Amino acid sequence: MKKLKIVAIATMLGAMGITAVYAGPYANKQKQCKQMQQKRANMQNIFEQLNLSNEQKMALQANRQEMRQSRQAMRAQMKGKRTQGQLVSADGFDKQGFIDAQMHRVQMRADMHAQRFEKTMQILTPQQRVKFVALLKEQKK
């Protein structure tokens, strides 16, 4: 009976240890997802407070759809240009090439987001822009 208890305790501790090892990165990922969901909810709340017209709502929806399509096109374009295999050889790793490739990727994403934001701001009226900025500042507090 005593051996059975020891085996049961050892099994439970082993399972708990394995769970802790695998839950660490996953828990962090869940936290990031929740933070992103909160940011989206905050932005949605801000846009609801702007009293957008139906035309503006349609334009914003078209803007989001265009962003999705450009993101998909960028993924397709980048898929053929995977560089990690080209940067690693028997002689070593091209660290600067890797950094340059990552910087290029980050720059492309930043440009896409800036274009989308610029289009979004053009859809808003001047009064809505002022209110939008005030709501963003209020949200940051």
Image (cartoon, helix red, strand yellow):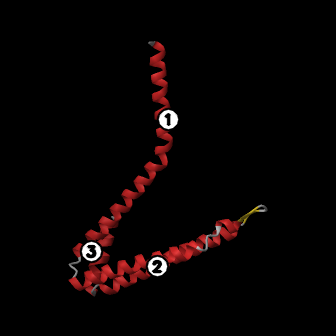
User: Viewer-proximal residue, 136 or 52?
Assistant: 52
Q: Position of residue 102 (x, y in %)?
A: 59, 70
Q: Which badge, 1 or 3, is on the more N-terminal residue?
A: 1
Q: Position of residue 44 (x, y in %)?
A: 28, 70
Left of 87 or right of it: where is 124? Answer: left
- Compared across the picture, whether 1 is left or right of 48 comes to right
Name the residue beneath numbered marker 1.
Answer: 17
Disc 1 residue type? Gly
Report how far apart the C-alphas of labels 1 and 3 lie in the structure.
45 Å
Q: Which residue is mark 3?
A: 47
Above or below, comparing residue 3 to residue 127 in the picture = above
Quadrant of the image occupied by residue 125: bottom left
Which of pointers 1 and 3 indicates the residue nearer the eye? 1
Q: Which mark is residue 95?
A: none
Q: In this figure, what is the number of numbered marks?
A: 3
Name the residue: 52% across, 77% down: 108
Residue depicted at x 27% and y 74%: 47
From what the image shows, is residue 95 above or below residue 6? below
